[in-house]
Image: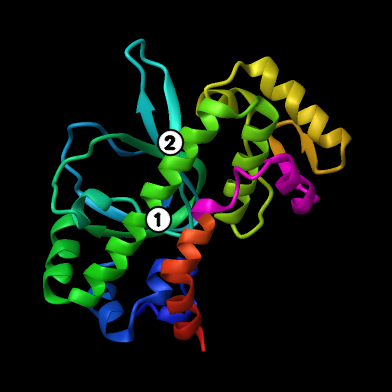
């Protein structure tokens, strides 16, 4: 069955011009993925890009001692395989699945061939890469300057944005790894946010109840990357949806 552009959930695929979408559609393969499935590994060839429909991939840096910390998120707003867009063939960082789901996979060679055929396709993907630079920079800022409550509030909002508002199936241990926090801090902070009525937390699941309250808790650290995405890609997406 031919994939219809208006039926996809991935925002990058939706905002492409019909002609650019046609350059990709025949080579898009629908795939499902599970928690912690590896997508890219440092120094290894990038064999495909993934346009996520549902779920979250984490872009992760590793410390000399072997610990992971998340530096960026990818959900239905974007794609993995940005190294291919920039002309590289290997991955600089780890990417693995944080929330299971599904997406459309395209082989590296097929993606690069399509980019070579269309400057407008390349431009959209490069604009997305710029939004990821901003997300990474603001994550570095919040990790360096913000307290645990602010960091967790921002992170929950970002995950919520990229999953169409679904409940978030996340363990405290995994959140601690992703945020570079001790697990007791995560548990204590989740309890405090729940006491304020911002979230509802049960074992392995967090539901966002009050986004405005979480945004206030983020203390201005949430929104810069989101505004950049909207500025560069939001208007184009609105035009494509009319």
Q: Which residue is under mark 2?
A: 71
Mark nearer the viewer, 2 or 1: 1
Q: Secondary structure at mark 2?
A: strand
The magenta region covers 206-225
Residue 117 visible in image: yes
Question: Any magenta on residue 92?
Answer: no
Considering only vertical position in the picture, is 48 above or below 170?
below
Q: Looking at the rendered structure, which numbered label has been put on residue 45?
A: none
Q: Position of residue 142 (x, y in %)?
A: 54, 34
Q: CA distance from mark 2 to mark 1?
A: 13 Å
Please tell me which residue is depicted at 32% across the width and 85% down the height of the picture: 18
Please tell me which residue is depicted at 11% across the width and 70% down the height of the picture: 116
Left or right side of 182 for 132 = left
As rendered, which of 169 and 215 lies closer to the eye? 215
As rendered, which of 138 and 193 lies closer to the eye? 138
Please tell me which residue is depicted at 63% across the width and 51% down the height of the picture: 160
Q: Position of residue 67 (x, y in %)?
A: 41, 17
Q: Which residue is under mark 1?
A: 131
Question: How busy is the neighbourhood of tag 2: few (under 14 within 10 Å), some, or many (20 plus)?
Answer: many
The residue at the far top in this view is: 65
Q: Secondary structure at mark 1?
A: helix
């Amino acid at each position: 069955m031919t994939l219809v552009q208006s039926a996809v959930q991935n925002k990058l695929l939706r905002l492409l011009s019909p002609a650019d979408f046609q350059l990709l559609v025949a080579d898009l393969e629908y795939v499902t993925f599970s928690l912690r499935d590896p997508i890219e590994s440092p120094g290894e060839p990038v064999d495909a890009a993934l346009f996520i429909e549902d779920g979250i991939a984490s872009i992760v840096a590793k410390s000399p001692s072997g610990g992971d910390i998340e530096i960026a998120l990818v959900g239905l707003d974007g794609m993995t395989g940005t190294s291919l867009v920039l002309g590289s063939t290997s991955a600089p960082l780890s990417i693995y699945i944080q929330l299971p789901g599904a997406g459309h996979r395209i082989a590296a060679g097929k993606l690069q061939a399509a980019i070579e055929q269309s400057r407008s396709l390349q431009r959209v993907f490069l604009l997305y890469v710029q939004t990821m630079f901003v997300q990474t920079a603001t994550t570095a800022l919040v990790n360096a300057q913000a307290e645990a409550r602010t960091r967790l509030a921002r992170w929950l909002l970002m995950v919520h944005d990229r999953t169409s508002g679904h409940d978030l199936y996340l363990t405290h241990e995994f959140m601690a790894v992703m945020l570079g926090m001790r697990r007791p801090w995560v548990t204590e902070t989740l309890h405090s946010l729940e006491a304020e009525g911002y979230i509802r937390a049960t074992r392995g699941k967090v539901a966002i109840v009050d986004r405005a309250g979480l945004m206030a808790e983020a203390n201005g650290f949430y929104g810069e990357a989101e505004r950049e995405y909207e500025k560069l890609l939001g208007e184009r997406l609105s035009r494509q949806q009319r």
